[in-house]
Amino acid sequence: TVGHLILDTRDDEKYDTSHVQGAVDLAEALTYNGKHIILVGLASKLTWLEHDAIEKLQRSERALSFKMLADGFGAFRRAYPFFCEPSASSRDEEFKRLRERRLHLYPSEALPSLFVGGVESANDPKVHDDLRITHMISIIAVIDPVASTPLLRN
């Protein structure tokens, strides 16, 4: 996302098996400037790898802030398997372009099982399936009385 960088601090073997889409390793993270860093590790407590990564990024003055993914990569993968990928697929440029477009369709999870999003995610059955959304409330300024479906249209 703009202004944010996902830093995967797990070892290369674990990263190559699966990682959060768009995540980078420390060497690549050191090439970015002015980003808020989201650390993805094995657990919710900092390991020496995360301490080392934070220290290097702080010394380089490239990071604006640090947050850690709650409960580590395993918990994230169980909750959002569709946001994880093996390394081989992340190198394909066409796949990256389609993935980036797709990621912007997903709403934000405000609370467990409560999502806030736009009309695109409200109209996308794949988003509903992925997030197990069963009910929606629409809050809009203008209602289209001619809409032919119960969902909103652009």
Image (cartoon, grey):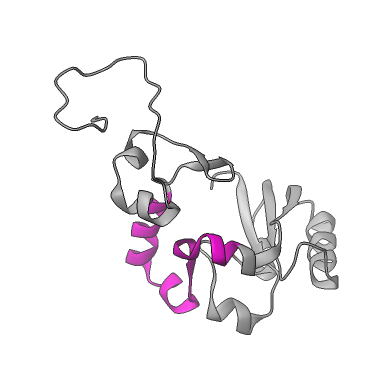
**Which residue: 40% across, 29% down?**
137
Mark yes or no: residue 102 visible.
Answer: yes
- Which residue range is magenta in the image? 76-103
Give left or right: position of 76 versus 142: right
For the view shown, which residue lies furthest in the front direction?
134
Across and down, in percent, residue 89 comes to 41, 74
Q: Characterize the magenta stretch by its predominant secondary structure.
A: helix
Q: Nearer the viewer, residue 150 or 92?
A: 150
Across and down, in percent, residue 56 comes to 81, 63
The magenta stretch spans residue 94: yes
**Which residue: 62% across, 80% down?**
14
Across and down, in percent, residue 105 comes to 38, 45
User: Please, is residue 32 above or below residue 120 in the view?
Assistant: below
Give left or right: position of 12 versus 56: left
**Which residue: 63% across, 64% down?**
75
Mark yes or no: residue 31 visible.
Answer: no
Quadrant into which the C terminus falls: top left
Number of labelled discs?
Answer: 0
In the rendered image, which quarter is residue 59 located in? bottom right
For the view shown, which residue lies furthest in the bottom direction?
13
Give left or right: position of 149 versus 12: left
Q: Nearer the viewer, residue 36 or 46?
A: 46
User: Please, is residue 74 above or below residue 128 in the view?
Assistant: below
Across and down, in percent, residue 151 comes to 26, 33
The magenta stretch spans residue 84: yes
In the rendered image, which quarter is residue 19 located in? bottom right
**Which residue: 60% across, 66% down?**
24
User: Please, is residue 47 above or below residue 37 in the view?
Assistant: below
